[in-house]
Image: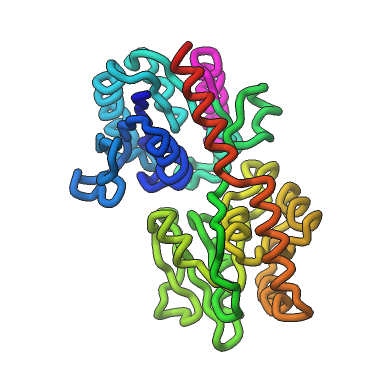
Amino acid sequence: MRVVVATVVHDPEDARIRHRQIESLLAAGDEVVYVAPFGAIDETVPSGHRDGLRIRPVRRAAGRHRLGAFIDARRVLAEESRTADLTVLHDPELTLLDRWVFGPILFDVHEDLVAQMEDKPWIPRPLRWLGRSVARWVESRALRRMPVVLAEESYRERLGDHPVVRNTPVVPDSVVPSTPGRVVHLGRLSTGRGADLLVAVAERLPEGVVLDLYGPVDSGLDLYTDDEVETLRLHGSIPNPLALKAIAGAAAGLALLRDRPNYRHSVPTKVLEYMAHGIPVIATPLPEVRRLLEDNNAGLIVPFDDPQAVVEAISALDRDGLRERCVQNGRRLVRDRFDWRQDAATLRRFYASVAAS
């Protein structure tokens, strides 16, 4: 197949899009045109240097600045979809361009768009009701006009019985042993994802322990720098494969999301990635995360907004063999139930069926 994959919102190195879905298509011998908000074409390394993959850079849609990206995407999609077997859209707003897309279209739903409006700092709080209304209209329009694939089983409750391709990790055959001294966090840093709580944790860490943060920081969010808190190290946004190598051997992986509607009924991908790479998980008590960790003895649950409880949980991992039990149980759980190789096969079959239809 020749597949056009498009986003103007997500980072070009997004783990689900670039390092799971696109890699799976390329491994199967498919040709992929990746429409994404790279800068100049010389910034596409390493993604641009891959057999079967071609890059079409567009502007990024960020905050209220979205029109330029929308215009770019309309032009590129109209060009590239003419010879494509399938066009996959990863942003809700791109579904509004369906009349400029030739051939079969598929919408990949990454998150609960309506609930997500509560975690958009660029939307003034008094206008978030309007954002939710627009989100419902965009979703409803997309569901009427094109096939949909969901990233979470829980999305079926609101969006209907559509195929699910989960955002699961690739489970390595072996891992670096988890050892004390370094705690890590993967993913975007925002208020809803506990960015300020992570700083508070770093301030309370005992001597000899540091917290490494791998991920972009939301605009307008004021975090300490390395100079201000010696136990906190900000690494910024780096490609998922490099981030997974960087966290190898960490003492614990943190997932301190707050109780927001968009997070309540899902398991953050970072939780699965920590377990896959042999890192004990410390997470807040979101219902699905709590059930997964406690039922399988694969990590520790701490209260919302309690940095001291997080520090105590980090120390608890060093007692009574708890660290090794969390590592072994977590690795087994992800290997049996959440390995991307299972979801990659589902993805390829569904793509082929939509293209054929």
Residue 347 in sight in this render: yes
Residue 114 falls in image quadrant = top right
Q: Is residue 137 above or below residue 200?
A: above
Please identify the quadrant where the N terminus is shown.
top left
Name the one closer to the observer, 131 or 151.
151
Residue ranking furthest to the bottom? 207
Residue 199 in sight in this render: no
Residue 143 in picture, x, y percent from top left? 55, 18
**Dominant secondary structure (helix, strand or loop) of the stretch shown in magenta:** helix
Horizontal relation, residue 248 to residue 253: left or right: left
Q: Is residue 271 above or below residue 11?
A: below
Q: Residue at x 78, y 79 (%)?
A: 320
Residue 3 in picture, x, y percent from top left? 36, 26
Give yes or no for residue 139 being in the magenta stretch. yes
Which span of residues is magenta-colored? 127-148
Residue 151 in picture, x, y percent from top left? 58, 36
Name the one closer to the observer, 159 or 225.
159
Q: Is residue 66 above or below residue 76?
A: below
Q: Residue at x 51, y 55 (%)?
A: 190
Horizontal relation, residue 174 to residue 154: left or right: left
Q: Residue at x 53, y 50 (%)?
A: 170
Give yes or no for residue 330 being in the magenta stretch. no
Residue 209 falls in image quadrant = bottom right
Q: How is the image coloured?
A: rainbow
Residue 251 in picture, x, y percent from top left? 60, 74
Q: Residue at x 37, y 42 (%)?
A: 62
Residue 160 falls in image quadrant = top right
